[in-house]
Image (spheres, helix red, strand yellow):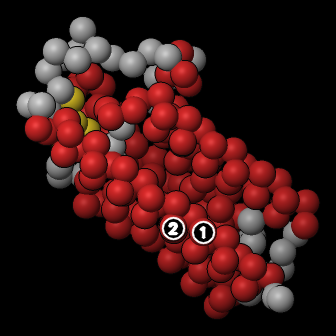
Amino acid sequence: MSSEVLFTVLVLAVGLERVAELIVSRRNAAFSLARGGVESGRGHYPFMVVLHTGLLVGALVEVWTRRPDTVAVLAWTMLALVAASQALRWWCIATLGRQWNTRVIVVPGGARVTGGPYRWVPHPNYVAVVVEGFALPLVHSAWVTAVLFTVLNGCLLATRIRTEDAALAELA
């Protein structure tokens, strides 16, 4: 099997993981909204969806059109980082429980979560996103996608974190 096919399988697996996240997110968002949750940052959410979809599509397009050589040590290192980012993301989801979703929804009167990875880092899920954003494309040396996603994601996260911090400031 070619490295391009194996990479495609990896990207499709990450895509399926994202679908699982969206299922959890929609359930949790409905739960929070039913309890009076207030959503912030709706304006940047569509850009986030396009950007994250673009990461997966862009990596595949780059690998299949540019056909970069796979550097074994880079591929294995980046694959380990992709796996670590997935583990961190699901640790965040488990720690936040019903409070986790892909939107910024805060239920008034709730408490800010300070356990799990949030004990050490204020936004560990975004650490996972940043790591995955450069590591996934670099599994197959798709550096253009890695750089482009990283720059655009940095701009998005600047807005997203400000929005989230302002919303979370309302919690006890």
Dot 1 corresponds to which residue? 13
Residue at 30% across / 60% down in the picture?
47
Would residue 155 be found to the left or right of residue 94 on screen? left
Confirm or deny contact between disc 1 and disc 2 (CB under 8 A).
yes
Q: Is residue 103 visible?
A: no
Dot 2 corresponds to which residue? 16
The one of 34 and 136 positioned closer to us in this rendering:
34
Coordinates of residue 104 in the picture (x, y in percent): 25, 39
Would residue 16 be found to the left or right of residue 104 on screen? right
Residue at 47% across / 28% down in the picture?
95
> How many numbered marks appear?
2
Coordinates of residue 76 in the picture (x, y in percent): 85, 59
Looking at the picture, does residue 2 appear above or below residue 125?
below
Residue at 69% across / 44% down in the picture?
84
The three-letter amino acid code for the residue at tag 1 is Ala
Coordinates of residue 114 in the picture (x, y in percent): 44, 15
Q: Is residue 130 visible?
A: yes
Could you give the CA–CA distance between mark 1 and mark 2, rounded to whole angstroms?
5 Å
Would residue 47 be found to the left or right of residue 167 on screen? right
Residue at 23% across / 17% down in the picture?
110
Coordinates of residue 82 in the picture (x, y in percent): 68, 53
